[in-house]
Amino acid sequence: VGLDGSDDAQNLFTADIPTPVALVVGSEGSGLTANIRKRCQLLVHLPMSGHVSSLNAATAGSIALFDIVRRQHGEPQSGS
């Protein structure tokens, strides 16, 4: 799964993420290369609202991984 801001990328929060999954995050300046994009089974983006149009790669990747793991393993138990 490629984390990409392109127009053809699906919303991460509603996309059907395959399992097992490997997440590929592009560089902050230019994103994923065309070759990497072609090799991804699925392209997803983080929906943004307000004045923020993008996040740095580490932050975006962390959010994406958290959401993928949360959906695969369920919500954390209270007090965890």
Image (cartoon, grey):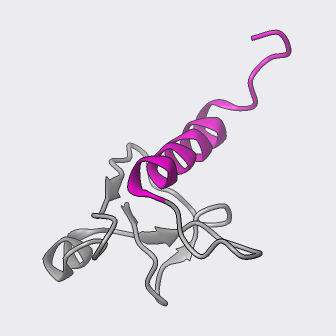
Q: Residue furthest left?
A: 35
Q: Is the magenta stretch mostly helix, strand or loop?
A: helix
70 in the magenta segment: yes
Task: Point out residue 71 in the picture as x, y percentages from the top left corner.
Answer: 65, 42
Q: Looking at the image, is 19 positioned above or below residue 32?
A: above
Q: Looking at the image, is 65 positioned above or below residue 28?
A: above
Residue drawn where x is 57% and y is 62% of the image: 16
To which quarter of the image does residue 33 belong? bottom left
Q: Which residue lies furthest to the top in this view?
A: 79
Q: In which quarter of the image is the C terminus?
A: top right
Task: Point out residue 6 in the picture as x, y percentages from the top left corner.
Answer: 43, 84
Residue placed most toward the observer, 21 or 12: 12
Residue drawn where x is 48% and y is 79% of the image: 9
Task: Point out residue 37 in the picture as x, y percentages from the top left corner.
Answer: 26, 76
In the displayed structure image, the side of residue 79 where residue 11 appears, left or right: left
Task: Point out residue 48 in the picture as x, y percentages from the top left corner.
Answer: 67, 72
Q: Looking at the image, is 63 positioned above or below residue 56?
A: above
In the displayed structure image, the side of residue 13 where residue 19 appears, left or right: left
Q: Quadrant of the N terminus?
A: bottom left
To which quarter of the image does residue 43 belong? bottom left
Residue drawn where x is 33% and y is 48% of the image: 22
Q: Looking at the image, is 33 positioned above or below residue 26?
A: below
Q: Which residue lies furthest to the right in this view?
A: 78
Q: What stretch is highlighted in magenta?
A: 56-80
**Tally of numbered discs:** 0
